[in-house]
Image: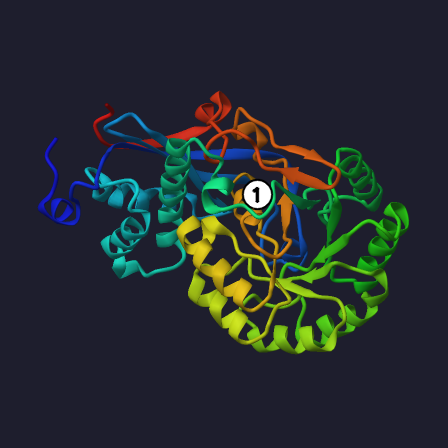
Amino acid sequence: MTHSANSAGRQGEATLDRIAWIRLSSVTLPLATPISDAKVLTGRQKPMTEVAFLFVEVETEQGHQGVGFGYSKRAGGPAQFAHAKEIADELIGEDPSDIGRLWTKLVWAGASVGRSGVATQAIAAVDVALWDLKAKRAGLPLAKLLGAHRDSVRCYNTSGGFLHAPVEEVLENASASLAGGIGGIKIKVGHPDSKQDLRRLTAVREHIGDDVPLMVDANQQWDRPTAQRMGRAMEDFGLVWIEEPLDAYDTQGHAALAASLDTPVATGEMLASVAEHYELIRGNAADIIQPDAPRIGGITQFLKLAALAEHHNLQLAPHFAMEIHLHLAAAYPIEPWVEHFDWLEPLFDERLTISDGRMHVPARPGLGVTISEQARAWTRATHEAGVRP
């Protein structure tokens, strides 16, 4: 195989393997029920009916394989696939172990479109695949490769508490989640009628009892005065956190709110880079930080952010994508939370084990997931680079 002069100049006798082949797949996951949160009720978005995924499969000359994925809700999936398609050739002939260098190489390959958003979200799927490959080659679960602090992580359910569901359904979903071993319940708030939020929250707290961890999520739909009023009104519910009470980029507003409430403030899921999260951390704008590895550029970037968060003694509760975030949360020194969504289960052959309020790191190497035949059937486009060994 011919390798570029640039690659050869960076590789020596320590390079034991090279990337030979990459396949990108654009997969659209249909949701059984249209999903509505506060963004829908305020008219900013339409109900969500599907989630777009970018899957990346990597194989080396020696036959080692890795799989990674990223996603986009409502819009952006085709753009992620298109960007990944443009830069995929940059990896052929490279050492798959040099993940940090390869992340930088891919960023510079598409530098004109920036270092956040769609560009780095496309890179994220590649980055996750390379970490999966590295852990598989080592014969270790990814959490163990990174250096786990625990073999299971506290978990809470979100998918049963959306605003489109009547309160009776939310209560049934909460009971089912707790019976299935999940440790906490999160419900959506941000209804235009704040009394409706408080009625739903009261019903859920009375239903699950005072000892079950309970969180709420306003999805950025409150202004500062409303967030202050609702935050004070919710103090007596013993919430683990109030999530995204304000616009994701309102650092000053979040900081003021966090300083004024006993209930912790959590945010960060919508930020698209480590730099954006750094502004949040520097401004003391969150008690609990909620990064999303596929949104900020993958595992390489997540680890940088985790180091910053630990330095500031922040709690961690990664957003969505539990198949990835379970491993990253397990490697975080301060006891974290991981979010349970069952939406992604049809995409994989394996299931994660949940019991006693915790999600357990699988013994399988890497992420511990393989792409299902159903995911293959939902594939809308593919692209290959290199030659499969």
Question: Which residue is identified by label 1?
Answer: 326
Left or right: 149 with respect to 165? left
**Image colouring:** rainbow
Left or right: 204 with respect to 369? right
Q: Secondary structure at mark 1?
A: helix
Q: Looking at the picture, does residue 342 appear above or below residue 80?
A: above
Left or right: 201 with respect to 72? right
Q: Amino acid at mark 1?
A: Leu
* Residue 322, position as x, y percentages in the image: 57, 42
Q: Quadrant of residue 33?
A: top right
Tell me how many marks there are.
1
| Crowd tier of the residue under label 1, counting other residues whose Cα lies within 10 Å: few below 14, some 14–19, many 20 or above | many
Q: Nearer the viewer, residue 50 or 350?
A: 350
* Residue 378, position as x, y percentages in the image: 47, 28
Residue 298 visible in this rendered orientation of the protein:
no
* Residue 312, position as x, y percentages in the image: 56, 69
Quadrant the N terminus occupies: top left
